[in-house]
Amino acid sequence: GPSPVTVHVTGFKRFHGVADNPTEKIVRNLQSFVQKRGLPKGLVLGSCTVLEAAGQGALGPLYELLESTVHGREYGSLNQEQVILLHFGANSGSLRFALENQAVNEATFRCPDELGWKPQRVPIMSSDGSILHARQTTLPVKEISKSLQQMGYDVMPSDDAGRFVCNYVYYHSLRFAENHGIRSLFVHFPLFLAIDEEVQMQFVASLLEVLASLKLQ
């Protein structure tokens, strides 16, 4: 049959202007939530990690996670599993879910992150050149959005993940994913005031179903 898909999920802690980050709660509760309802066939929930809402602060745990996802694949293990890195972040100004198609090589933080860093027009990876350089996900964002819309969710594809910590983490993840033959996707969530927690948890379960159903090569 098709090779299993292992999904590693990250969310963020609170940050400036968002005292309760919905993605922190979602990611902390995800393991027990999917245990109760069961995971889609062929899908494994590899790990759930909550990152600091800070550019540099998130990188240590992020790279630990990234390295762990490919550990063992280098040693020619026969397990041809597919790996998807699934990053969740909050967009406090939004009323819907957004699947981010790309990240841009630019850190311009509108406010300091949780460690007080406030870069302006700085390349995230100087070796990638210009701050205009973008990296795209290899997952079919339009197709995934359409499936979720058909399931009744208010979700859309997006080409702008902002220039704050979300984009910063996504850029690092996409670069790593490309170098190691795995996949990465960032999803922006509204606050629970806009879409309540229960619906957001159902959304994540549905997203996992859609990812499990994709024909990944």
Image: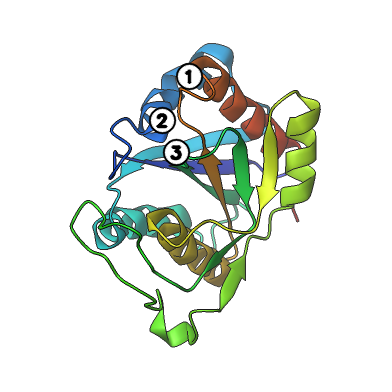
Question: Of helix, strand and loop, which one carries label 3?
Answer: loop
Q: Which residue is mark 2?
A: 22
Residue drawn at x 75%, y 56% is 217
On screen, 12 above or below 181? above
Q: Which residue is mark 3?
A: 92
How far apart are labels 1 and 3 at the CA level? 14 Å
Task: Determine which quarter of the picture holds residue 110.
Answer: bottom left
Q: How many marks?
A: 3
Q: Depth check: 169 or 62 in front?
A: 169
Res 187 visible: yes
Task: Determine which quarter of the picture holds residue 179.
Answer: bottom right
Mark 3 neighbour density, 10 Å: few (under 14) some (14–19) many (20 or more): some
The answer to the question of whether label 2 and label 1 lie on touching residues, with beta carbons closer than 8 A, is yes
Residue 89: x and y in percent read: 45, 43
Q: Which mark is residue 197?
A: 1
Colour scheme in use: rainbow
Question: Of helix, strand and loop, which one carries label 1?
Answer: helix
